Image (spheres, rainbow, N blue to C red):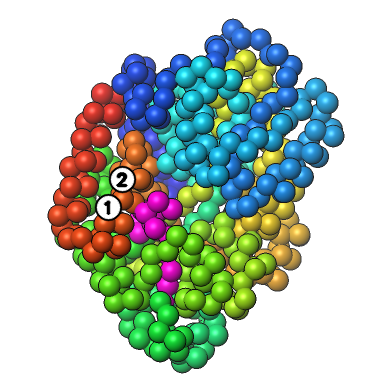
Amino acid sequence: MNPLNAQLSRRTALGLGAVAASSLALTACAGGSTSGGGSGSQAEDSGAPLQFWTNHPGSSQDMEKEIVDAWNADNPDAQVELITAGSNYEELSQRFNAALSGGELPDIIVASDVTWFNFALNQQTTNLDDFWTQAEVNPEDYVDTLREDYAFNGGHYGVPYARSTCLMYWNTDVLKAAGLPTDRGPETWQEFAEWAPQLRAANDDKPVVVVPDGSNYLDWYFQGMIWAFGGAYSQEWTPTFTEAASIEAGEFLKQQVADGNIEISTDPTVAFGNGNAAALLQSTGSLGGLTETATVPFITTFLPGPGPSCATGGAGVGIPSGIADARKVKALKFIGFLTNTENTIKFSQSTGYMPVRKDALEHPDEVAYLEENPNARTAIDQLNENTQPQDYARVFVPGGGQRIGAALDEITLNQADVTATFEALSEETQTAIDRDVQPLL
């Protein structure tokens, strides 16, 4: 099944009566009250500036300010205020939950791959299908796979914005010194293990690859590895952590860490950029910063396979449901501007995230940029060739990503028993599904 059809089918399965059910059962999913700041159909537009809550993904604060300033210059009746609402997606989500409990609601929020769904399920964000026409935004202009990541119950609850895949970054000086190809990474994780002794010998016994820890999305990066081994976090709503292939992937990760080939780091991007590892497993959103700051030459490559062995990720933008309809239209018009062809090109080139508009890839500026910067093309090619939808256990089960990340920290940092850790993880995941999800399906 191709990614688009897979996305559509999984949302169809999720949508069976979920929104008609009481949202109170999922209060714990989003971490706060399910009440909004007012009814979108009854509240009036105060005329105050629209609040755009963001965590500036990919160190994009300056770029976001430039876009907001350009919008404000041309739209005196729909001014936008740029608000730093957290240093990461989770902090922003927590602040939004606090606003849902009775504070002042924003008008636009950044929502990540693991936060948007619970807001949509609880009817806390707006079905944008009701407002595309009024806002003069055409949803068909967005890359189909990325747009459909926000499809649920017959509607769309987000617009793709800072969208990414995982990438491997390889120090070409180390590859050359090790006598290995300098134009590709290992094709499989087994080949990675074969390359490891040569890479360490050529780089003062430094780790081969640095990876973020469980509090910084190791659960996202490991998802590709578990797929490459034939495992998964889940098959739809059934956890599969304890299947043989999943255990094998966990054992491989644990052993590679024990052997010193993989290092779990709280700041892996800096470590790689300073030459303290041969490779980095990180988001496309790190490409812009690394291109400017890395002291070593590098290439970007697909994740080791066999594929598909990479998940899409990053964030979109959504609109709270508890604001006036007139503000929703203004907010969606701004989102259309934020993600228009010109701005998605500037944003992607500045940060490393993927262009989210179809026509952006054909724009002369982007064509020329990709020819001069082949590292930026890797994510685009990988989206088409090596990705698949994320497992429900990570992105749809409340707290899924954090739960998996904590378990991965146990087997990597503490070298805990993989089977026992994954068995406990499976039980915790099933409990969350039975308690927080099944009552709404």
Closer to us: 245 or 256 = 256
Q: Give me the residue at 57% from left, 56% from top.
A: 285
**Amino acid at pointer 1:** Ala
Relative placement, left or right, of 407 versus 174 is left
Relative placement, left or right, of 113 versus 239 is right
> Residue 432 in the image: x percent, y percent?
25, 34
Relative placement, left or right, of 190 versus 32 is left
**Amino acid at pointer 2:** Arg
Locate residue 55: give its quadrant.
top right
> Residue 77 in the image: x percent, y percent?
80, 22
Q: Secondary structure at mark 1?
A: helix
**Quick check: can you spot residue 356?**
yes
Residue underneath mark 2: 403
Residue 210 included in the magenta stretch of the image: yes
Relative placement, left or right, of 331 versus 378 is right
Residue underneath mark 1: 407
Magenta segment: 208-223
> Residue 288 in the image: x percent, y percent?
64, 61
**Quick check: can you spot residue 143?**
no
Q: CA distance from mark 2 to mark 1?
A: 7 Å
Label 1 near label 2: C-beta < 8 Å?
yes
**Dot 1, how many residues are within 10 Å of its Cα: few (below 14), some (14-19), or many (20+)?**
some
